[in-house]
Amino acid sequence: MDDKFPVLTYLDDRKARVDKTLREVLPGPEAPPALLNQAIQYSLFAGGKRLRPILALAAAEAVGADADPLLPLIAPLELIHTYSLIHDDLPAMDDDDLRRGIPTNHRVYGEDLAILAGDALQAMAFGLLADPHRAPTIPPEARLAAVYELAVASGGGGLVGGQVLDLRTPPPSEAVAPDGPERASALATLDGIHARKTGALIRAAVRIGALLGGATSAQLAALSRYGEGIGLAFQIADDLLDVDATPEEMGKATHKDDRRRKWAYPGVVGREASRAIARQWIDGALDAIEPFDERAEPLRGLARFILDRRS
């Protein structure tokens, strides 16, 4: 495995391709209703690494597909992610004032437009993915499978269900001992929340790229294990950034989990144990794709990036 893979260059290149596709397939800011489309564009183009569509592209490449023609069917992943962020920031949810260093959508456009912008993004995502005129060479069964993956990851068994658990699960009382009887229960609660709220869409992104790229059943199974591993590691890394990174690095307030007594790895098992668990998930993800050839190097680089990122 080549630890020198230029992951930042890869991210920049694929982000530019995803952004170009998003601008091509979505209504412009002046299209009616203009205020709605301006609210959508405000959050969609406020920054972000486009990690989910990039993972889908990398998975398609890993199974030997030309990923560029798939971009219109992969861009919807970013629409779902953006919708979830807009809604997560609302006063009824996490009540955040900043996202990516700028005021959150509801602070600029009001709660009503923020809710509707999120609703519209979700509908647009499924409309794009189901549109037979986009990427018309993709077999209908692969497109339908991708629609199903996105629906499952977005709903009650995925990010919406994860948000419910995040909001309504009674907070942890205190950090658990490394060898105490409460540890297994605490980790099961953490993973149950994170696997839905964050991990489900990341896993779906990898599976959607694989499905659209024509993966074999064995390849899809391996990539599913990879997606599960990096999805959980991503949220652990995010929990660690909340206590280790500065607000400037994150583009939003930090130490929120402690103040709100939310379920987060550092507060439950401590920082060092959190880092070790994240490393285990990444190692498992890399093991899952070990049989793949050099075409999977972007996936390997992205896994390491998820563990080491600073924002």
Image: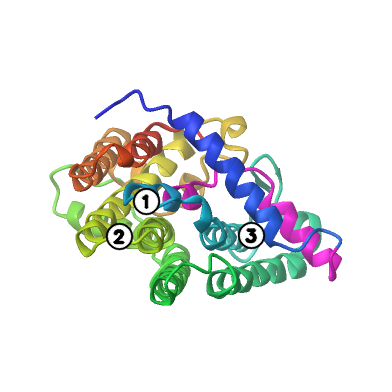
Q: Residue at x 62, y 66 (%)?
A: 92
* Callout 1 touching callout 2 (CB < 8 Å): yes
* Callout 2 touching callout 3 (CB < 8 Å): no
The Cα–Cα distance between marks 1 and 3, rounded to whole angstroms, is 27 Å
Q: Residue furthest front?
A: 137
| Among the two numbered marks 2 and 3 on one chain, the one whose residue lies closer to the N terminus | 3
* Callout 1 touching callout 3 (CB < 8 Å): no
Quarter of the image where one finds residue 177: top left
Magenta region, residue range: 31-55
- Magenta span contains residue 40: yes
Mark 2 Cα-neighbour bin, 10 Å: few <14, some 14–19, many ≥20: many
Q: As shown in the figure, which amino acid type bears the numbered disc 3?
A: Ile
Q: Which mark, by number, is residue 86?
A: 3
Q: Is residue 213 left or right of residue 68?
A: left
Mark 1 Cα-neighbour bin, 10 Å: few <14, some 14–19, many ≥20: many
Residue 3 x/y as whole percent: 30, 25
Q: Residue at x 37, y 51 (%)?
A: 59
Pick the front one: 238 or 186? 238
> Mark 2 falls on what kind of element?
loop
Tag 2 residue: 215
Q: Is residue 114 left or right of residue 258?
A: right
> Mark 1 falls on what kind of element?
helix
- Magenta span contains residue 162: no
Quarter of the image where one finds residue 295: top left
| Among the two numbered marks 1 and 2 on one chain, the one whose residue lies closer to the N terminus | 1
Tag 1 residue: 59
Q: Can I make out residue 185 in this image?
A: yes
Q: As shown in the figure, which amino acid type bears the numbered disc 1?
A: Ala
Pick the front one: 194 or 66? 66
